[in-house]
Image: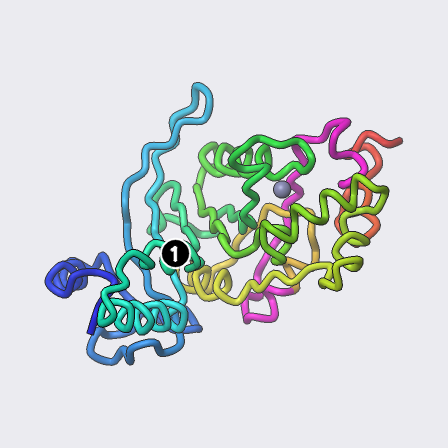
Amino acid sequence: MFTYIDPTVRTRLEEQGKLFQIDRDGVLLQTDRVAAGGAGISVLGPIPLPLRLGDNEIPVDWYACVRRTELGKIEEIADELRAQHGQASFATLASSMAVNSVLIIGDPATWQNPLVRVHSSCMTGDVFGSERCECGPQLHMALQRIQRDKQGGIVIYMSGHEGRGIGLWAKAATYLLQDGGENTYEANRSLGLPDDSRDFTDAGSLLKFFVGDQPFRLLTNNPKKVQDLEQMGLREITRVKHVTGVGDNNRGYLSAKQDWGHELTPEDIGTD
Ligand SMILES: [Zn+2]
């Protein structure tokens, strides 16, 4: 069977503990107990990443994480493609796989109540620096706050969360609708899409594995995010306000979030 990683390399990484599987409850699975494509998450790492934000150097350990069901399906299709000499389509296959990232700052062995950010991917904000939202500054500020924190902590970057789960293509359409006068949630509804379709299940499993059952502080203004993680069995979450990147280009967007339930004050968004 085609494996996404060459079998000898796979074995070597598994022996080094740098390719491993966890189940939905964040429990490490023994390699021989892992069924192909079964439930759970495959993890590759730690991979040292020397980040630089402005003058600030932030060394992190990166873990790449993918749902086993998704990886299993990709491997199956890749197998068929290989039989048909269709390797040229591998890139299309790989790019459709949602690989989440875990970034560890500091030494997890010393954590008692680490600082955590579960960040939803945003191509326009995180990568291009768009000010239509405040995602880019929120991500960078989270990395800086965690680095400055005595305990350190973790950023979980959810790659499948673009546009609150509707994907980049639909998000582009909602931007055009917003420019016609709708707010961010109304635009989703106009397209027949939910206000928020983000799934935090994988984030919950990863937090259980990397943070364990100790309490943690979550950088977010969104009480629903805390509730979603609590439903995963993570009980001791303290919400920490995380406001940054507010400006003329996103004040309306933040007002809509405030109306929807985000705990933002008029002072936070400069509308008082
Ligand atoms: Zn954004």
Q: Position of residue 214 (x, y in %)?
A: 47, 60
Q: Which residue is mark 1?
A: 92
Vertical placement of 90 versus 139: above or below?
below
Residue 122 falls left or right of residue 63 = right
Q: Secondary structure at mark 1?
A: helix
Number of numbered labels in the structure image: 1
Q: To which quarter of the image does residue 248 belong?
A: top right
User: Tag 1: residue type?
Assistant: Thr
> As drawn, is 128 to the left or to the right of 1?
right
**153 lies left or right of 85:** right
Write the residue at 36% across / 57% down. Answer: 94
Residue at horizontal 33 percent and vertical 71 percent from the top:
77
Residue 57 image point, x, y percent? 38, 26
Name the foreground residue: 10 vs 112: 10
The quadrant of the rendered image in which ligand 1 is seen is top right
Point out the stretch of residues depicted in magenta.
228-253
Q: Is residue 119 above or below residue 24?
A: above
In this orientation, which residue lies closer to the viewer: 238 or 100? 100
Residue 78 position in % (x across, y down): 29, 67
Residue drawn at x 27%, y 77% as measured from the top left: 34
Q: Is residue 221 above or below residue 59?
A: below
Taking depth in this image into account, of 228 and 108 the one nearest to the observer is: 228
Q: Is-magenta flag for residue 140? A: no
Instruction: Indicate whether 57 appears above or below 15.
Output: above
Task: Please state which of residues 82 and 208 is positioned toward the viewer in this rendering.
Answer: 82
Quadrant where the C terminus lies?
top right
